[in-house]
Image (cartoon, grey):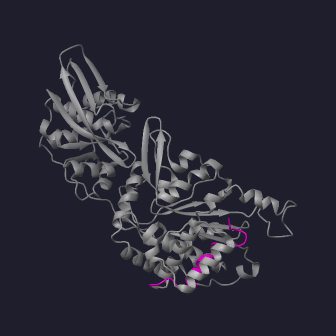
Amino acid sequence: MVARAYTVAFQGVEARPVEVQCAVTPGLPAFSIVGLPDKAVSEARERVRAALSAMAIALPSKRITINLSPADLPKEGSHFDLPIALALLAALEIVPADAAEQTVALGELSLDGALMPIVGALPAAMTAAEEERTLLCPKGSSAEAAWVDAAQVIGARTLAEVVRHYTGQSPLPAAQPGEVIAEPFARDLRDVKGQERAKRAIEIAAAGRHHLIMIGTPGSGKSMLAARIPGILPPLTAAEALETSMIHSLCGLLDEGGIDRTRPFREPHHTASMPAIVGGGKGAKPGEVSLAHNGVLFMDEFPEFPRTVLETLRQPIETGEVMVARANAHVRYPCRFMLVAAANPCKCGYMSDPARACSRAPVCGEDYLGRISGPLMDRFDLRIEVPPVSFSDLDLAPSGEGSAAVAERVAGAREIQAGRFAGHERVRQNADVEGQLLEEIAQPDDEGRALITRAAEQFGLSARAYHRILRVARTIADLEASETVRRPHVAEALSFRVSARVAA
């Protein structure tokens, strides 16, 4: 008899079903696992053997064969321990075979039979719901899996609890979802002295998910401004929270199964490698661009990142997804993020200060910012210079609007966009609009069209730059709850695009 249980193999955020077949046949005693397992899966036989021994269950002196089907799909990870043990228990007639066949199981076994938490429980629950099966996982991972309403999730602490559950001795209760995490932000825009133009830029960027680059001398407040962007962004919607949490689940970043409604804010160091930024490495794991999905990717010291890393950002910025291609895997991850970059004007950082600039100015600035290619710079919707703040301004009391007031306007603009794009699956914010839809929603009035036409001729704007200016103008109009894009909206959008030093 061949007993069956089910589990999943991860390919990106997709959890593909895997059938675990177990056959106990006469022959020389052996325990083999086939079906393209990696080292961690092959070692499962020793963990399963020890866990069963801890429960006083002895394996028969027969040939035990475990097949992971489909056989051509790579199997990676320690979460195959539990389904292998479950299929084996069904083959030994210790648990009912039909109950095992109705289960998608995943979990790592310790030698004493305890079940260790694993990554990927949330996407596995999605697959279990589609297959109309129960998800069985470790207790420590059940809270995140229970967020999938359509799936029945059971969490167990030990393999013995699994046996008692399926034999009816002590049924396990259904798992409950973890808490919704929404931590208040301690960083407020009111803390930033001066820099009113920069504050306006990050408000527009947050309202339409536009990409922003800030260039200024060291200590002018670029990082301080970027760190306050999450405080003006609206919480993740239910659909966005599920998308983002599935990626974080694969990386083990969900805290005790809780779903975080705050938008991700990722800030990789400029020494990060290409796999760390766009994804890759063993198992083609998601990179920073995917971990920032539906949130912010802040890249400080932007020109210091390796050129190859910067150039790989061009395609994800345009498409909102990244394909991690390796010899044995082609994995697609979503990465619809808001890129915020910060850079000094030159290597020394003080090109605009005659008293402190090096003798190579302005050549040093051209060389330094020249590390950012024209096509990549063209993808920034907003470009601003952040001047240094005078000491007299630093002594002033906090002034200007706080994050709460700005967040209210940003939320209002995003609500307008949500209603506008309700029938468009791949469009959520103004930054996503293109083609005919952009012409319909961002058509400026006659004065605005004349202004942008003159600017395009004078500054030699590319077609991409022209369309991005229209998107920004549409966002500025949304912040004012204006149905039409007028000349002042176009003028302000142009002012953030054709800055004298930052323009490409």
Residue 315 location, x and y as percent?
Answer: 52, 54
Q: Residue at x 48, y 63 (%)?
A: 295
Count the labels in the image. 0
Q: Is residue 152 left or right of residue 390?
A: left
Decide whether residue 105 is among the magenta residues: no
| Residue 193 shows in this picture | yes
Residue 499: say if magenta. Answer: yes
Choose between 483 and 127: the one closer to the eye. Answer: 483
Residue 334 versus residue 67: which sits nearer the camera?
Answer: 334
Point out residue 203 in the picture as x, y percentages from the top left corner: 54, 76
Rendered residue at 88%/61% (across/down): 359
In the rendered structure, which segment of residues is drawn in magenta? 483-504
Front residue of 16/266: it is: 16
Q: Is residue 185 visible?
A: no
Q: Is residue 68 shown above or below 490? A: above
The percent coordinates of residue 427 (x first, y second) are 41, 66
Q: In the rendered image, which quarter is residue 79 located in? A: top left
Q: Quadrant of residue 340?
A: bottom right
Residue 417, by quadrant, is bottom left
Q: Quadrant of the C terminus?
A: bottom right
Image quadrant where one finds the N terminus: top left
